[in-house]
Amino acid sequence: MGLKEQGMNEFALLDEKEGIPLFYPYIAPETKDELLETINSRWIGQGPKVDKFEQKFKEKLSSPNKFIATGSGTDSLHLAYILAGIKSGDEVITPVFTCTATNLPLLYEGAIPVFADIDAATMNIDCNDIEKRITSRTKAVVAVDYGGLSANYQKLTEITKKYNLTLISDSAQSIGSKFNNLNSCDYADFTAYSFQAIKTITTADGGMLSIKDHTLYEKAKRLRWFGIDRSLKQLGTWENDIYELGYKYQMNDISASLGLASLNHLEEIIEYRKNLMKIYLENINHPKIQLIGKEDFQGNNCPWLCTILVKENRFNLVKKLRQNGIESAQVHYRNDRYTIFGERRKDLPNMDLLEDQYLVLPLHHKVKQDDCKRICEVINEGW
Ligand SMILES: Cc1ncc(COP(=O)(O)O)c(C=O)c1O
């Protein structure tokens, strides 16, 4: 059940002056200079800053893959699904618990999302629930790094290799996270990132797609721009025929300016977030609370969300936090609750178990360490 069904929608939004909001966009100090340079130049659409942002992002990840910047994480996911050759009637195994943006673009292609259960300790896809859902129509497996916590890419690679499936990572929430010291894009055939307003790095809206197979790079760029080869178009030739369905999924130079400024601070942003998570991990000690990813967040993951399981009266805790000026929310809902995905599934026991328990707490650069300690105290007092 959601907040509204409980008659609690008045708790959903909090003005920052009232207390600690759940999210807050990170804007780097040099953003204004970067933006000024862009708006004083010839290019504000997709131009040199987008190229520079792609290059800098690739360097930050030390990746040999190809990278294309897009208008959003959703655009990146849609392009990944097309490039993976996912077609109408194909089945794709994907987590039931995620932002709807993971799964909606599968419907754009007429594919069938086959929802896998979540792991009860991490809320990521349960790797033990994948194999039994594979059929002759299965084309790909999608993993989401929920809250910044890396999915188990070692197991996912084993399964997808064994059945010759494409592995797609939705890393919208996990820039800066690693699994066994490798980035998700080192494992996945396609990796989608999001720079939407409240993500670890933001470009207001924007995304990135990492592509392992270099032969798909030119096609990816064409699909991002109506199906046209922009480099040929700029030569003024008529070799730029459209022979495949393309989209308008590019990033623009204004967004790239925000991204370039923020990337300068990626390491410190990650460090700050890790330190807040450490405070939550060390200080929340109420017997009715369990932290999602308790083990894994002590390692190489950059937290985007701090998610707790509230074993009793979740909405009483929401109310108490709100009375103390602290915003909290569920953020995502199991995707089979949405009519567009068909009937609610009956074979997802971990999702059923956690559905009425999880709650997300503030974790971002505006949350001070003392705020974080106070949030822990409010929780530990009970509700
Ligand atoms: C897991 C996940 N996937 C995809 C997206 C979509 O990204 P965007 O909003 O940039 O389209 C988001 C966030 O919005 C997300 O959290």
Image: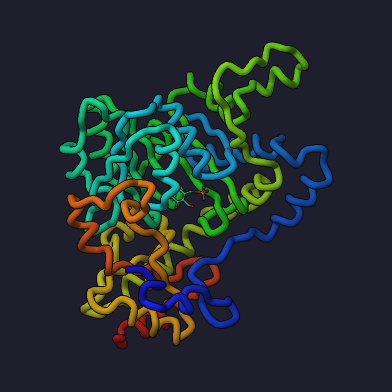
- Vertical arrangement, residue 232 with respect to residue 14, above or below: above
- Vertical arrangement, residue 165 with respect to residue 350, above or below: above
Expressed as whole percent of the image width and height from the top left, the position of residue 327 reads: 46, 75
Q: What's the residue at 46%, 39% (across, down)?
A: 77
- Residue 178 in view in this figure: no
Expressed as whole percent of the image width and height from the top left, the position of residue 221 reads: 58, 27
Front residue of 346/55: it is 346
- Count of marks placed on residues: 0
Q: Is residue 26 left or right of residue 362?
A: right
Q: Is residue 50 left or right of residue 13?
A: right
Colour scheme of the rendered structure: rainbow
Q: Is residue 130 left or right of residue 342?
A: left
Expressed as whole percent of the image width and height from the top left, the position of residue 52 reads: 65, 37
- Residue 234 in view in this figure: yes
Q: What's the residue at 45%, 67% (across, down)?
A: 363
Q: What's the residue at 44%, 39% (across, down)?
A: 105
**Quadrant that contains the C terminus:** bottom left
- Vertical arrangement, residue 76 with respect to residue 357, above or below: above
Front residue of 261/140: it is 140
Front residue of 94/197: it is 94
Expressed as whole percent of the image width and height from the top left, the position of residue 124 reads: 29, 51
Q: What's the residue at 48%, 64% (across, down)?
A: 272
- Vertical arrangement, residue 80 with respect to residue 19, above or below: above
Front residue of 369/316: it is 316
Task: Give the quadrant of residue 182.
Answer: top left
**Quadrant that contains the N terminus:** bottom left
